Amino acid sequence: MRTLVIAFVIAMGLLGTAGVAHAYPQFQLVRDQTCTGCHISPSGGGMLNENGLNAAEAMSQLDHSAKFLYKVNTPKWLQLSGDLRAVTGFIQTPEQAFVAFPMQIETNVRFVFGAFSLYATPGLRPTTEGNAAATFAWAREHYVMWQQKPEESEGLYVRLGRFMPTFGLRFAEHPMYTRRFGGTQLFSETYGLGVAYVKPRYEVHATGFIADPIIDPVENANGAALYAETRIDPRTALGVEGMVKVTPDLDKQYRVGVTAKKLLGKDLLLQGELQFVNTLVENKRNGAGTGAPTQLVGSLVLSKPFGKNDQFLVDLGIGHFDSNLRIRDLDRDCVDLNVHWFVDSHVELILNSRVEMLAFGNGGPNAGYALLQVHFRL
């Protein structure tokens, strides 16, 4: 019980020190069939393309320009954006505290050379103890990308550099169980080669990656990830995923999962992801892998935009994580409620709230939070 509570406190500390802006998969099927319909990256998240800027402007409460800093025009070969986030609210772990802190201070810059582009996200990051000077500032993502159809949002994409492997539903809320325990936790970007092929009816993403040789990585492993999704019809999508990781100690982790998205009615979107994880720990005597925790992690989220211009978005989700299926009362479950208000094309207010239970109360006291987040897109 004590270990689980400490782990939750650490995770909340990460939530407090940093956050990263990703795409909202809640908009897929509702507004477009693919993430590339609104984003530069084949994974979604980060910088918006022209269609994404138009969507941000159209769905906001106030009719303000979505250009960089509202009015800055850049040449065609240069694109600029950025994200500033701060949060305040109440946390119970079960200790109770009111908190306020910055989450994200990042810029995005993209240089375009025909089918090639250079993308980077210079910004600040939490310092590493004993090495603060080297880790205070960085570019969390930086890569070179080749796009088969630069003027379109489909086709072949090839990326080389530092980025997050494309895997799973990729929710913006990084405490979501299928992100936090699902292979794409906060700051797990690393160097790799990614190939993606995106079409309105399907998409495939393959990534090979290595442990970051420059800074202490969150994911100290080499490996590969594969994610494939097919849109059975404009209202239904199914995906499969797999990931393998090998640490310097030769421990191996295998992760497989499925995703599903279903548009109910006009704009009510149901999304789910379920992963099974198996870890083999290297036996130092004979070099053979032995059994270690087999884990199960899943999330189910119901999302609906509302308001005159869909300037509000509400998410109701549940999460489950069992850190070892062989041991009782190690599982945890949560209920999430997130409410987004897109005030204008640059300003977003978000209420993030959660109640978390350990083995439905058998593993210790409940925990949770209610946080108000302010997001300003440059």
Image (tube, grey):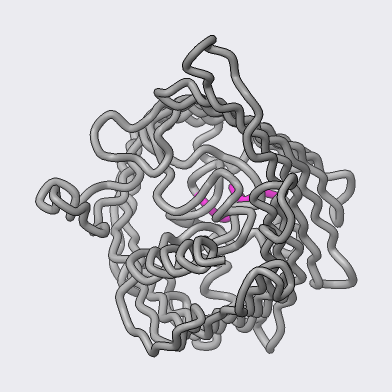
| Picture residue at 47% right of the left edge, 42% below the top | 164
Q: Is residue 128 left or right of residue 211?
A: left
Q: Which residue reaches farthest top?
A: 286
| Picture residue at 38% right of the left edge, 75% below the top | 376
Q: Position of residue 310 (x, y in %)?
A: 66, 80
Q: In the depicted view, which residue is nearer to us: 9 or 299?
A: 9
Location of residue 241 with respect to 41 vertically, above or below: above
* Viewport quadrant of the C terminus: bottom left
Q: How many marks?
A: 0
Q: In the depicted view, which residue is nearer to us: 60 or 175?
A: 175
Q: Is residue 66 left or right of residue 288?
A: left
Q: Position of residue 124 (x, y in %)?
A: 23, 59
| Picture residue at 74% right of the left edge, 43% below the top | 200
Q: In the depicted view, which residue is nearer to us: 282 or 300?
A: 282
Location of residue 178 (image quadrant):
bottom right
Q: In the depicted view, which residue is nearer to us: 223 or 67?
A: 223
Q: Is residue 374 magenta?
A: no
Residue stretch rendered in magenta on the structure: 34-39
Q: Which residue reaches farthest front?
A: 285
Q: Which residue reaches farthest left?
A: 133
Location of residue 150 with respect to 345 vertically, above or below: above
| Picture residue at 33% right of the left edge, 67% below the top | 17
Q: Is residue 205 visible?
A: no
Location of residue 322 with respect to 143 vertically, above or below: below
Q: Is residue 36 magenta?
A: yes
Q: Position of residue 182 (x, y in %)?
A: 61, 48
Q: Is residue 131 left or right of residue 53?
A: left
